[in-house]
C-alpha cells in the first residue's frame, strides 16, 4: 500500500530548525530526568549526618539500610509506574496532551522534594520518599513520550541520531548535578567554616547544611520549567494525528507549518490505511504476538538485563573513589566537604566516560546501525566485567588502582555507546503508531525493574562473605568478585537476547511496523524486518 504524503514528506525532509527545536524541548526533559534521578546519590551521606547522628560514635551518622533503600529506590519505583501509565495514556490521548502533564509533575515534585518537612528524621524521610515517588512517576512518563515524539518527527535518514541526542541529554543532566553540588558546597564551605568529624563530631555538621541538600534537589525543577511553554506549543505528531486520531486535514496543516511546504490532506487514504485488518489489532491479540511478540520480548529483556548491570555499577563507585584517593575517610571531613568530594568524583566519571559514550552513539548510530552498537556494547561490557572479576585481587592492590579505574570507566563508556542508548531508541521505531508509546513504556518499565534489581539486589549481594566485614546493618553477601562474575553473565545473556531485536537503520516507521502492508503483502515479506546486517 502506498504511504501517506504527509508521512513520506517527514521521512524525506532535510534536517531543519524544527528538528533541533524538538531535540532541545524533548532533551531538556531528559536532562531533568537524569538530574533528579542521580542527584540523590550526592546528598545521601549528608542526610545520614544530619538526621542519624549518634553521640559518641567513631564515624558520622549514616542512613540505615532500609531508609537508604527507600530514599534511593522510591523514585525508580515511581518511574516504572509512570512509564506504564503515561505510555498507555500517550496512545489514548495523544503525545502532546500528555507531554505537558509529565513535565509539570516533575517541576512540582522537584520543588516539593526540597521542601520535605517534619521535626524528626522519620517524618522528613517519609515526606521526601512520598514526593520522590511522584517525581519518578513524572520522569517515567517522559521516557515513552520523548522517544515517540522524536521518532515521529524525525526523517528516516537521521532518526537514530535525533533520538540518541535526546537521550544523550541525560549525560549533561548527571554532569550538571555534580557541578551544581560543587558550586553550592563551595559557597557553604566558604561562608560557614566547620571542623572535621574527628575533631568535633557535632560542629562538623553545621545547621545550615540542611539547606544544601534541599537546594540541590530543587534545582532540577528549573530546566524543566523553562521548556514547559515550548512543550505546549509543539503540534501533535503527524503520525498520531493521521494514523491514530484519523484526522488527515489536521495532520497536513500541522506539518505544513513545521516543514514550511504545502502538504495534501488525504482523508480517504487515511481511513483506508487505518481500517484494514492488519492495522487494527490490539496489544493483547494473536496478530500482535505474531507480528511483534518477538520484538517486544527482545526490547524488554535487553533493557531489563542492561539496567541490572548499569545501575549495579554505581555500587562499586565508593570502592573506586576511595582507591584513587578522591574520597578520604568520612571522619576526616566535615559534612559539606564530603558533599563536595562526592560531587567532584561523580562529575569526573560523567565527564570522562558517561557523556562521551552517549555522543559516540549520536555520531555513529545512523552509520553502523542500532543492532551493531548494541552487540558491541554488550560484548565489551561482558569482557570488562570478567576482566575486573577474574583477577579481582590484582585490582585491589594499591599499585593497580589506576588500571581498575580505567577498566571501570570503560564499562560505563560501552554501556552508553551501546545498549543504554539503543534500548531507548529501538522501541520507538519498530511498533505501530497506535501502540508505539505503550510498547516503549512497557520496554522502559522492564528496564526500571532491572534497575531496581541492580541497585538493591546487588547492594545486599555484593556485601562481604564475612558478616563482620559487611556494611553496618547488612547481612553477609557473596562478595564483590562473585557479584562482578554474575554481572558478566547477565551482560552475555543481554548479548544473546539482542538477536531478537530488528535493525531499523534507514527504514521508515511504517516499514518497521508493517503498517504500510496489508495481510497479503505481509505474507510475502515475512521475516524481512527481523534480519540483521553483517557486522
Image: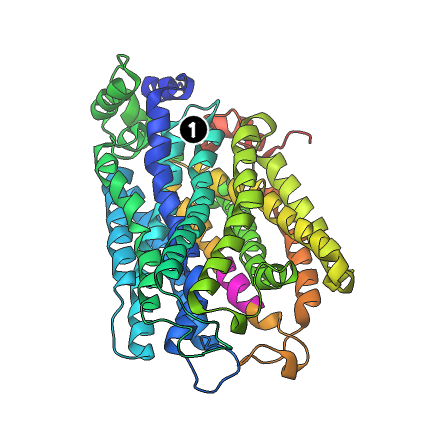
Q: Quadrant of residue 214?
A: bottom left
66 versus 400 height, above or below: below
Q: Residue at x 42, y 37 (%)?
A: 166
Q: Is residue 468 left or right of residue 131?
A: right
Query: What residue is shown at x 62% (from left), y 49% (from top)?
Result: 409
Q: Position of residue 304 (x, y in %)?
A: 53, 54
Q: Give the vertical position of 78 relative to 25 (above or below).
A: below
Q: Is residue 142 above or below residue 49?
A: above
CA neighbours of label 1 inside 10 A, class few (<14), some (14 to 19), many (20+): some
In the image, residue 281 sits, relative to residue 192, either above or below, namely: above
> Which residue is drawn at the image coordinates 34% and 55% (left, top)?
82
Q: Is residue 93 magenta?
A: no
Determine if residue 435 is in view.
no
In what quadrant of the picture does the C terminus appear?
top right
Magenta span main SS: helix
454 relative position to 270: left or right? right
Q: Nearer the viewer, residue 8 or 324?
A: 324
**Quarter assignment of residue 147:** top left
Answer yes or no: is residue 455 visible.
yes
| Segment colored magenta | 450-458
Residue furthest top in the image: 262
User: Which corner quadrant holds the N terminus?
Assistant: top left
Closer to us: 437 or 57: 57
Q: Measured from the top left, where is residue 240 in percent x and y?
A: 30, 33
Q: Secondary structure at mark 1?
A: helix
Q: How is the image coloured?
A: rainbow
Residue 112 image point, x, y percent: 25, 61
Front-lying residue, 324 or 505: 324
Residue 46 x/y as whole percent:
42, 68
Residue furthest toward the bottom? 56
Q: Which residue is mark 1?
A: 510
Amino acid at each position: 500500500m502506498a504511504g501517506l504524503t504527509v508521512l513520506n514528506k517527514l521521512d524525506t525532509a532535510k534536517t531543519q530548525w524544527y528538528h533541533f527545536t524538538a531535540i532541545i524541548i524533548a532533551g531538556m526533559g531528559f536532562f531533568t530526568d537524569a538530574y533528579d534521578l542521580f542527584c540523590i546519590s550526592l546528598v545521601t551521606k549528608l542526610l545520614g549526618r544530619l538526621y542519624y547522628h549518634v553521640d559518641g560514635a567513631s564515624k558520622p551518622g549514616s542512613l540505615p539500610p532500609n531508609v537508604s533503600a527507600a530514599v534511593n529506590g522510591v523514585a525508580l519505583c515511581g518511574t516504572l509506574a509512570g512509564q506504564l501509565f503515561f505510555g498507555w495514556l500517550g496512545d489514548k490521548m495523544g503525545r502532546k496532551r500528555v507531554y505537558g502533564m509529565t513535565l509539570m509533575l516533575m517541576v512540582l515534585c522537584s520543588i516539593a522534594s526540597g521542601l520535605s518537612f517534619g521535626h524528626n528524621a522519620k517524618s522528613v524521610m517519609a515526606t521526601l520518599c512520598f514526593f520522590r515517588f511522584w517525581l519518578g512517576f513524572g520522569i517515567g512518563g517522559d521516557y515513552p513520550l520523548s522517544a515517540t515524539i522524536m521518532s515521529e518527527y524525525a526523517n528516516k535518514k537521521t532518526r537514530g541520531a535525533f533520538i540518541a541526542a535526546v537521550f544523550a541529554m541525560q549525560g549533561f543532566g548527571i554532569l550538571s548535578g555534580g557541578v551544581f553540588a560543587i558550586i553550592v558546597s563551595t559557597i557553604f564551605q566558604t561562608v560557614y567554616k566547620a571542623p572535621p568529624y574527628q575533631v568535633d563530631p557535632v560542629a562538623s555538621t553545621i545547621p545550615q547544611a540542611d539547606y544544601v541538600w534541599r537546594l540541590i534537589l530543587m534545582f532540577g525543577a528549573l530546566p524543566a520549567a523553562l521548556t514547559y511553554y515550548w512543550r505546549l506549543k509543539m503540534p501533535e505528531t503527524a503520525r498520531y494525528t493521521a494514523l491514530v486520531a484519523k484526522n488527515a486535514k489536521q495532520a497536513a496543516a500541522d506539518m505544513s507549518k513545521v516543514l514550511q511546504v504545502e502538504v495534501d490532506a488525504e482523508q480517504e487514504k487515511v481511513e483506508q490505511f487505518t481500517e484494514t485488518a492488519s492495522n487494527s489489532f490490539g496489544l493483547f491479540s494473536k496478530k500482535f504476538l505474531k507480528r511483534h511478540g518477538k520484538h517486544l520480548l527482545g526490547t524488554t529483556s535487553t533493557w531489563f538485563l542492561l539496567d541490572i548491570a548499569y545501575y549495579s555499577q554505581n555500587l562499586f563507585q565508593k570502592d573506586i573513589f576511595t582507591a584513587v584517593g578522591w574520597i578520604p575517610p568520612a571522619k576526616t571531613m566535615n559534612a559539606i566537604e564530603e558533599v563536595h568530594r562526592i560531587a567532584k568524583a561523580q562529575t569526573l566519571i560523567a565527564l570522562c566516560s558517561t557523556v562521551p559514550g552517549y555522543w559516540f552513539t549520536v555520531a555513529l548510530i545512523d552509520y553502523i546501525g542500532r543492532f551493531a552498537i548494541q552487540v558491541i556494547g554488550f560484548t565489551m561490557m561482558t569482557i570488562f566485567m570478567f576482566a575486573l572479576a577474574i583477577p579481582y585481587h590484582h585490582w585491589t592492590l594499591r599499585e593497580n588502582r589506576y588500571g581498575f579505574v580505567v577498566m571501570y570507566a570503560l564499562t560505563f563508556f560501552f554501556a552508553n555507546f551501546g545498549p543504554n542508548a539503543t534500548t531507548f531508541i529501538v522501541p520507538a521505531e519498530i511498533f505501530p503508531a497506535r501502540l508505539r508509546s505503550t510498547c516503549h513504556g512497557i520496554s522502559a518499565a522492564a528496564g526500571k525493574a532491572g534497575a531496581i534489581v541492580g541497585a538493591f539486589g546487588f547492594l545486599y549481594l555484593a556485601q562481604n562473605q564475612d558478616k563482620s566485614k559487611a556494611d553496618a546493618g547488612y547481612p553477609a553477601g557473596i562478595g564483590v568478585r562473585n557479584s562482578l562474575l554474575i554481572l558478566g553473565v547477565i551482560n552475555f545473556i543481554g548479548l544473546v537476547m539482542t538477536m531478537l531485536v530488528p535493525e531499523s537503520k534507514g527504514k521508515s516507521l511504517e516499514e518497521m511496523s508493517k503498517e504500510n502492508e496489508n495481510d497479503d503483502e505481509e505474507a510475502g515479506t515475512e521475516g524481512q524486518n527481523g534480519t540483521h546486517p553483517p557486522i
